[in-house]
Image (cartoon, helix red, strand yellow):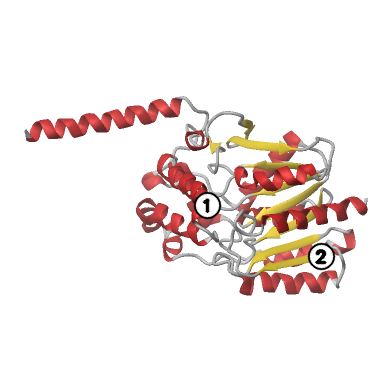
């Protein structure tokens, strides 16, 4: 009886493995196991496949939307549609191993305890952004970055001043974010890998719940994130690598923000800061307050600078249960400023 029970368990395990690999053979990226494979567009970029989506007419001023640490382009769908209706072109894409984008599984297999072989530095993220832009648009740009996407947007805007005509930072990682104990331990070699493997998924899910105002209204997003953590080990590995190596997480980007603010007003480049005052990841104080102090001084009451702090609003400030319409209107107002200054 014991032998039969053991054989039954082994048979079930083999069936689960075969089903898993059969499912993986049917999709281009592991993200498609969660988000489906219909209507997905990809670019072949240096480290793998990048999923992207565009809205609006091709020859319009282009607004590029960059998501956060564990986000994906679908989270901006409502905002992108509304901005396209207002006459702008919107481009969004998934960071590598987030959403449906993926680094090459053959070239870059995960190591011991699921450690990612690639270092997700800020330069690594900006290279993906550059290759997406090279392939899809030569228009002037407005960059909109949320959380980690804010760090990418700031670095790119600082280095590509002639191309970027406006910048919107939403609860952005400029000062190093507030990290959980698990996230701090994850930075320690070897021990960090063990912590990520055994506690990373549950810790990140708890973080996601803290980032929304109403858990019930965000049940689909939370369920998709849970499934990504379960079915795509590269998702957690990529986030852990960003946590370990990406500037903004590891060192402050305040010098780059100061540099941006020292030149942007002279070049008529508008800046908008949008922040939830209940943000527990990049807390309103000191993060937003410090950035606002620097920006307000640099722009000297100019209409090019806008500051939108929202009370009782968490990290995901643009989510449907937070301030989606206000965020969209603020971005549209900045874009209108850019068009008027042409």
- The residue sitting at 67% across, 48% down in the picture is 126
**Percent position of residue 37, x then y:** 54, 29
- The residue sitting at 48% across, 47% down in the picture is 225
Query: For this view, does 162 lie left or right of residue 213?
Result: right
Neighbour tally class for label 1: few under 14, some 14-19, many 20 plus, Cα within 10 Å: some
Neighbour tally class for label 2: few under 14, some 14-19, many 20 plus, Cα within 10 Å: many
Q: For numbered disc 2, what is the local secondary structure?
A: strand
- Where residue 305 is drawn, which disc sits there? 2
Name the residue carrying label 1: 218
Q: For numbered disc 1, what is the local secondary structure?
A: helix
Give the foreground label among 2 and 1: 1
**Percent position of residue 35, x then y:** 52, 37
- The residue sitting at 11% across, 30% down in the picture is 4
- The residue sitting at 84% across, 50% down in the picture is 162
**Percent position of residue 57, x then y:** 81, 35
Q: Kindly check if marks 2 and 1 are in contact, taking CB atoms under 8 A apart as contact.
A: no
State the residue in front, 199 or 187. 199
Query: For this view, does 11 lie left or right of residue 308?
Result: left
Q: Is residue 338 visible?
A: yes
Query: For this view, does 127 lie left or right of residue 233?
Result: right
Q: Quadrant of residue 103?
A: top right
Count of numbered circles in the view: 2
**Mark found first going from the N terminus, 2 or 1:** 1
Query: For this view, does 146 lie left or right of residue 141?
Result: left
| Depicted 87 relative to depicted 305: above or below | above
Q: Residue furthest front?
A: 216
Distance, label 2 to label 1, CA atoms, is 32 Å
């Amino acid at each position: 009886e014991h032998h039969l029970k053991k054989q039954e368990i082994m048979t079930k395990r083999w069936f689960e493995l075969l089903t898993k690999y059969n499912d993986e053979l049917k999709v281009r990226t592991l993200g498609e196991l969660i988000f489906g494979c219909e209507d997905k567009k990809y670019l072949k970029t240096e480290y793998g496949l990048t999923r992207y989506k565009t809205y609006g007419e091709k020859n319009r001023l282009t607004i590029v939307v960059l998501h956060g640490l564990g986000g994906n382009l679908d989270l901006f769908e409502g905002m992108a549609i509304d901005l396209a209706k207002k006459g702008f072109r919107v481009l969004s894409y998934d960071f590598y191993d987030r959403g449906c984008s993926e680094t090459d599984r053959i070239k870059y297999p995960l190591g011991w305890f699921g450690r990612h072989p690639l270092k997700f530095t800020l330069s690594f993220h900006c290279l993906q952004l550059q290759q997406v832009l090279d392939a899809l648009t030569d228009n002037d740009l407005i960059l909109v970055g949320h959380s980690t996407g804010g760090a990418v947007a700031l670095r790119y805007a600082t280095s590509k001043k002639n191309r970027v005509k406006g910048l919107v930072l939403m609860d952005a990682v400029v000062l190093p974010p507030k990290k959980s104990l698990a996230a701090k331990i994850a930075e320690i070699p070897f021990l960090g890998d063990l912590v990520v493997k055994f506690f990373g998924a549950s810790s990140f899910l708890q973080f996601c719940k803290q980032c929304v105002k109403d858990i019930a209204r965000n049940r689909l997003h939370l369920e998709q994130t849970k499934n990504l953590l379960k079915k795509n080990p590269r998702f957690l590995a990529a986030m852990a690598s960003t946590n370990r190596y990406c500037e903004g997480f590891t060192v402050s980007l305040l010098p780059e923000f100061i540099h941006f603010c020292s030149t942007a007003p002279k070049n008529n480049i508008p800046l908008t800061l949008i922040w939830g005052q209940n943000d527990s990841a990049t807390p309103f104080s000191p993060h937003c307050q410090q950035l606002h102090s620097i920006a307000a001084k640099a722009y000297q009451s100019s209409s090019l600078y806008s500051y939108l702090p929202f009370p009782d609003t968490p990290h995901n400030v643009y989510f449907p249960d937070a301030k989606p319409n206000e965020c969209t209107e603020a971005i549209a107002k900045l874009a209108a400023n850019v068009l008027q200054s042409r």
